[in-house]
Image (cartoon, grey):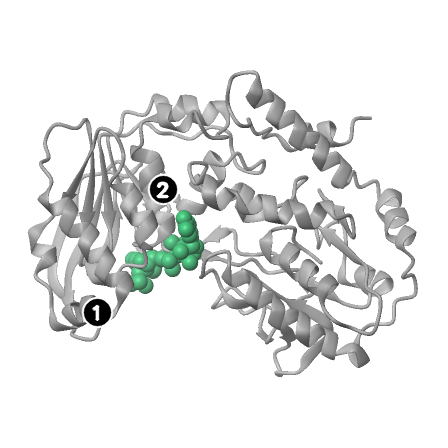
Amino acid sequence: MIGGGPAGIYAADILLKMERDFDVSIDLFERLPAPYGLVRYGVAPDHPRIKGIISTLRDVLDRGDIRFFGNVDYGTDLTLDDLKRHYNAVIFATGAVRDSQLAIPGSGLPGSFGAADFVSWYDGHPDVPRDWPLEHRSVAVIGNGNVALDVARILAKPADALLATEIPQNVYETLKASPVTDVHILGRRGPMQVKFTPLELRELGELDDVDMILYDEDFELDEASKTAIATNKQVFVINRIFEGWRQRETGSASRRLHLHFYAKPLEILGEDAVAGLRYERTRPDGEGGVTGTGEHRTLEVQAVYRAIGYFGSELSEVPFDAKRGVIPNRGGQVIDDDDEQVHGVYATGWIKRGPVGLIGSTKSDAMETVKNLVDDQASWWSPAHPEPEAIVRLLEERGIRYTDLEGWHRLDAHEISLGEAVGRPRIKVVPRDEMVEISDPE
Ligand code: NAP
């Protein structure tokens, strides 16, 4: 298994529990020194309920029937040929960690940030810079999905409210010093076409000392939106949340969250750094989509966060659909350019189906992949060295300083004790070398 996030761990668990007429042993390789992928490094720190999924994943790993190899990078430390020599098959569960590109002028200006990078920063990911330039009063967040909500909430939330979470100390200090007063969230469609989920949306309106600013012009609903409210429970609740915010008194808070709908980004303005965002006002096309009105508007902002979806990364020697950012597959069986199955190679999770759906949907996804893998027994690889010690020898010969489950327990306990010392649940260790050193003291 390549990838130690929820997709990989669920797939391993399902395979181990599945009725089958052969023994199975699973090695889980993870690029980072710690397991849990996007739950550790993507879920916002102030979402303890979702972070709680870690306890289910931990129960699976702690059972002891899956070997964990952290700090091992497929494509650099291990090749597909290595896997063929040691295993019968591989499942790629590498997720989607990059930002989708927003193809408008100015996207590359300093001050234009990918949401995924910002999320990695506040979640203490070892491979992103430790410093983040939070030095602007007005910022825009493009996108109407839950990642946009996370980004906007973390930007606007009083930093002290995050002390109860596991955010790294430098993140707390930077957020505490942030001069931001106005966060503008822009959706290219209407308020009834958002991808926010109701629970997460409601939470945005519960921040201390933050006014919610909505604009009447966005709430002249067309027939398609009215039908959506009448027929779709989720849209009904979302509408109620917006209506509640529209009734509120505003004007006294020190920060504001503005929601702009029917706003399609056209250009990020600025010479040497972001100075504004030009967008086109759109209108509903009657079918849930929008068309342009030709009216251009400008927002004065000094930073833009692009939260328009994640994108998968290509893996060495594995087919890749560069348009969708996924490994092409049929029910998890990887296929090549000629539509032929690539024997022994499978995919699950976001790298299989694209970066959509809550973590729970990863389970049914894994079920499908694992079932196909089991049914394909006749076409698996025949490894020359399937014995469990062989791969360990290979990693050691190559001088790869991998971490194991025991090492992770050590790091986990260390982070919790760092937190305990200052009355917090955990403080994450961020630098990769330090993570490895604590996991595997020499
Ligand atoms: P998402 O839900 O797909 O939302 C992407 C947003 O970006 C949509 O509003 C989309 O608008 C907009 N967009 C895409 N291309 C655009 C463009 N060129 N210009 C302007 N807007 C554009 O993706 P996400 O927010 O990255 O979330 C990924 C998944 O993770 C989702 O399933 C989400 O629910 C989940 N998640 C959950 C939580 C949680 O707390 N429960 C937190 C984070 C993420 P259109 O709709 O018009 O395409």
- Between 205 and 237, the residue placed more toward the observer is 237
The amino acid type found where label 1 is placed reads Ala
Q: How many marks?
A: 2
- Residue that appears at 79% across and 77% down: 377
Q: Is residue 138 left or right of residue 220?
A: right
Q: Name the disc covering residue 117, or none.
A: none
Q: CA distance from mark 1 to mark 2?
A: 27 Å
**For mark 2, what is the residue?**
151
Q: Nearer the viewer, mark 1 or mark 2?
A: 1
- Residue that appears at 48% across and 58% down: 311
User: How far across and down, in percent of the image, does residue 123 sit?
Assistant: 49, 36
- Label 1's element? helix
- Residue that appears at 26% across and 36% down: 302
Name the outermost residue toward the top: 421
Disc 1 or 2, which lies upstream in sequence?
2
Ligand 1 location (quadrant): bottom left
Q: Is residue 402 left or right of residue 275?
A: right
Quadrant assignment for the N terminus = bottom right
- Residue that appears at 62% across and 83% down: 338
User: How far across and down, in percent of the image, does residue 110 sit?
Assistant: 36, 38
Q: Name the disc covering residue 228, or none.
A: 1
Q: Quadrant of residue 356?
A: bottom left
The amino acid type found where label 2 is placed reads Val
User: How far across and down, in percent of the image, does residue 262 sit?
Assistant: 17, 59
- Between 112 and 54, the residue placed more toward the observer is 54
Quadrant assignment for the C terminus = top right
Q: Is residue 134 left or right of residue 2?
A: left
